[in-house]
Image (tube, rainbow, N blue to C red):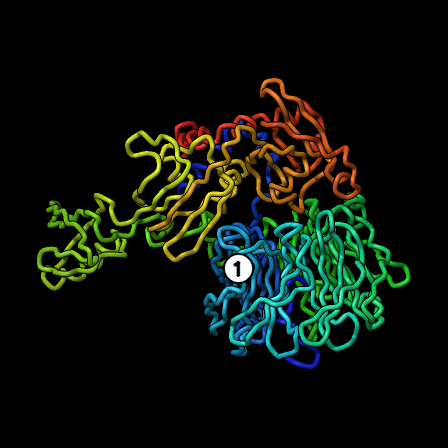
Amino acid sequence: MRGGVTGMRRPSGRGRWRRAQAILRLPALAAWVLLLSACAAGGAERLRPQAPPAPPAAEAASGGDFTRAAAIADLDGDGRADWIGGAAAPGGIVIRYGEAAGEAGGLQRLAVEGDVRSIAVADVDGDGRPDLVYSVQGRTSGIRVFLNRGGRLWAPGRPVAETGRYEGLRAADWNGDGRIDIAAANAASELEGGIQLWWGDGAGGFRPGGGPTVTGLFMDVLAADFDGDGRLDLAGSGWGAQGGLRVWLGRAGEGWSALAPVAEGPFYALSAADLDGDGNLDLLAGTYRNGVRLFYGDGKGGFVEGPPPPPGGAAGSAAPEGASYWQAAALDLDGDGRLDLVAGSLDQGGLHAWRNAAAKGWEPLEAGFPRRGNVYGLAVLAASGGEPPRCAAAHWGEGLLRLAPLSGRGAPPSAAASRAAPPEPAPDRGGVRENEVFKTVDGVVEYKIGPGDLIEIFFWEGATASRQELPVQADGKISFGLVEHFPIAGLTAGEAGRALEERLKAFFRRPRIEIRVKEHHSRTVRLLGALGRGGVPGQGAGEYRLKGRTTVLEMLAAAGGTHPDADLKAVRIRRKSGETLTLNLYQALLQGDPAQDAVLDDGDLVFIPTLTKDTQRVYVFGEVQKPGAYALTGQPMRLLDAISEAGGTTPYAYRADTRVVRGDITQPEILSADLGRLIERGDRSQNLPLAGGDLVYVPRSPLGDVKLFYDQIRPLLEMVLWPARVIIDWRNAADITGVK
């Protein structure tokens, strides 16, 4: 159950991002956009609630979000279960509070600048209220905390980790001191991965602890007592060349005892349950192209793999034998007292279910759950108080789904799931809605006035207006007529006009004021590094004024683009607060990832690094962690070297059909390699030598015909070879497409 329960303790204790998208919609790039699409899930289908005679198979707890994480807990102390989802687009945590019969629960969104990957619920500060701990990737990274202040109010807590690439996490008391600790799966790389732990101080703070391993790329971690000694143990799901399912037994204090790997292969998320009723915990694991795998525990820390459920999870399913599932969870779906299975497909198959037929094994079960789209995290709420168990599912495109078992619905439902429209509109998917430069009012971006700005004030008397220009003083105030020392800094023009009208009511009956910003001087950013057009006035490196909501790409376009040697995969932003962001603009430009195109704030320093002076470089794109250009340093480079430089493949890569494109763009040579055979079997014949100018592409699915592949890849070839031209073309997207 991915973050699906409250923190476990030992048994003995307690407007302008559209322009970037527009360039991706150009006809020349249409095929490439389809090729790089992270998911084929469509927009959410929103129907009004129907009032069926029995609860539906699945209903939306949040509508239209691209969710990755799920959890269930009573957050507000009203005795009802609340449903929690971690979203990627828009980034944030969505909470649907539990409702009484016949009443709609409240929907709340906690803003997060990034892709929320996993959520755990636990009281980390000892105030008796459950808090939220989450892993995030994007503009914000690491492991963060929202503290529960009561009354459905939340406040950011001290970060557990401010950097890092973490996937699944759990909250539990591993060292037996009565305080919540955190364990997380590190997916940074094979050499800088592992399972990390942080020991809690009971007041919301954490210190780094000794994890059981510091190497290997891990996707999830699980806390449970597998050997019955009263101490919590750890299970971890690995990925990559050293991927596998591992278990470490907890020892006295803060030590660990490593066991032999339970199984080899690439694994995703984990769950634990007693599937066979023998009193011992078993492991359920989602895998890449190997279905759902089940491992039965012996109560001493050992596990034996049992027969897997058949592919598809429903009669007549067309799911292939090599199906991928993110996570599987156990709950009694048919009310017979045995735990059944539900799993989220990563092959656009929605949710699959299987009935526990005891000695007959696992039988496909038509549970009426959605059968389309990708589903990630699952969380289970055990049956209690006469209520059947419930399950939350994180659907990529349709938000957080609440699943009802057959035993809680009366007659078997139809396959269609009921969707409830959210009571309030989702926030702008562009991300940041307010900072020191601007705020969004009713969907319109408005600039915040600051010291040094020149404003125009129009004072209306009937149909005529008198106009006066005033500079905002260093203390953020202005004097206008009978009103002196009026504070205006930090207000939008609309807010300032209304506030000034209120002050003038002491002297005029019905004053009418309109304020406009004529010159913007107070909010600036500085650009340094590999900028182009250094000799053109007003372009190149230097200081630029912000006039509203401006992203990095928009600012670079205004500055004349970048130098041909610019390293767009490692652009850095240093903020006044000391926070540092690293952006991969290749992902923003070529994959349409808005998380890599940060909104600029006052005082930001943007640095564009330069690739090494070597004239030879290779380009790595597709399903890799850090797509971009990589310089050849004089040493021979092979395919695996380039993939490693790019951070390795993502969990979604189809490594068997990796391609290398070489030579002139009009008549390239296209080489094929099976990266899976190279990594998993040591087949060195697949480790192709690379030459300067090669483009390596790792796909998500089989590419098929070479000519079709070239037709799809050509727009990418044209773009990656001239990064400066790409940004200039992106700046002109409005002229090409008409999109502003």
Q: Is residue 415 visible?
A: no
Name the spot of residue 276 as percent of width and height, x first.
84, 66
Q: Is residue 395 left or right of residue 601?
A: right
Label 1 SS: strand
Q: Is residue 278 left or right of residue 110?
A: right
Q: Is residue 425 left or right of residue 223?
A: left
Q: Is residue 712 visible?
A: yes
Count of marks placed on residues? 1
The front one of 286 and 697 is: 697
Name the spot of residue 130 as percent of width and height, x first.
55, 72
Of all residues, the one furthest to the right in this rendering is 359
Tell me the quarter of the picture where residue 214 sits.
bottom right
> Where the N terminus falls, by quadrant?
bottom right
Image: 440 above or below 17: below
The residue sitting at 79% across, 52% down in the picture is 264
Q: Is residue 129 left or right of residue 258?
A: left
Name the spot of residue 603 as percent of width and height, x first.
34, 51
Image: 712 above or below 471: above
Of all residues, the one furthest to the front in this rendering is 634
Image: 104 above or below 456: below
Of all residues, the one furthest to the top in this rendering is 667
How many residues crowd mark 1 within 10 Å: few (<14), some (14–19), many (20+)?
Answer: many
Name the spot of residue 6 as percent of width and height, x first.
62, 71
> Where the C terminus falls, by quadrant?
top left
The front one of 568 and 404 is: 568
The residue sitting at 54% across, 38% down in the picture is 591
The residue sitting at 48% across, 67% down in the picture is 157
Could you tell me the amino acid type at mark 1?
A: Ile
The front one of 611 and 353 is: 611
* Residue with the mark numbered 1: 93
